[in-house]
Image (cartoon, rainbow, N blue to C red):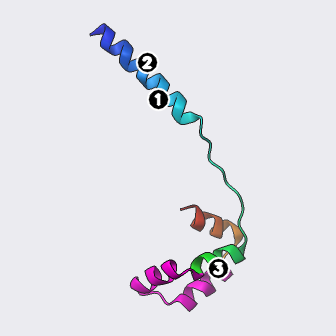
Amino acid sequence: MNLAKKRLCRLLVVSVTCLSIHSARAEMIATEQAVTYWGRAEVASQLHSLGVEQAFAEQRVAAMSDEEIGTLIGK
């Protein structure tokens, strides 16, 4: 049993080490980029299927602050 615990611990150490190598990258985006994103055909069709008009979504995105847009695109 002791050997199994050692192997499990080694595996966990290697896994955590490998997972922590990658770092997240965050950068600011412009309002125009968000408007372009919302104008894409697949997004427009998804909004339409949810019952949201594309013009309303574009107006809302244009009124958003940079922080709100960053949060939205980051999700």
Q: Position of residue 27 (x, y in %)?
A: 71, 57
Name the mark on residue 65: none
Looking at the image, is 25 positioned above or below residue 71?
above
Q: Is residue 50 magenta?
A: yes
Direction from residue 57 to residue 11 in the image, left or right: left
Q: Secondary structure at mark 3?
A: helix
Q: Are marks 3 and 1 in contact (CB under 8 Å)?
A: no
Direction from residue 71 to residue 48 in the image, left or right: left
Residue at 58 percent of width and 79 percent of height: 38
Name the mark on residue 15: 1
Q: CA distance from mark 1 to mark 2?
A: 9 Å
Taking depth in this image into account, of 41 and 32 the one nearest to the observer is 41
Q: Position of residue 13 (x, y in %)?
A: 48, 23
Q: Which residues are magenta?
A: 39-63
Looking at the image, is 58 positioned above or below residue 68?
below
Label 2: how many Cα within 10 Å (few below 14, some 14–19, many 20+): few
Q: CA distance from mark 3 to mark 1?
A: 39 Å
Which residue is labeled 3 in the image?
Answer: 35
Q: CA distance from mark 2 to mark 3?
A: 48 Å
Residue 22 placement: quadrant: top right
Residue at 70 percent of width and 75 percent of height: 31
Which is the main secondary structure of the residues drawn in magenta? helix
Name the mark on residue 10: 2
Direction from residue 6 to residue 75 in the image, left or right: right
* Quarter placement of the N terminus: top left
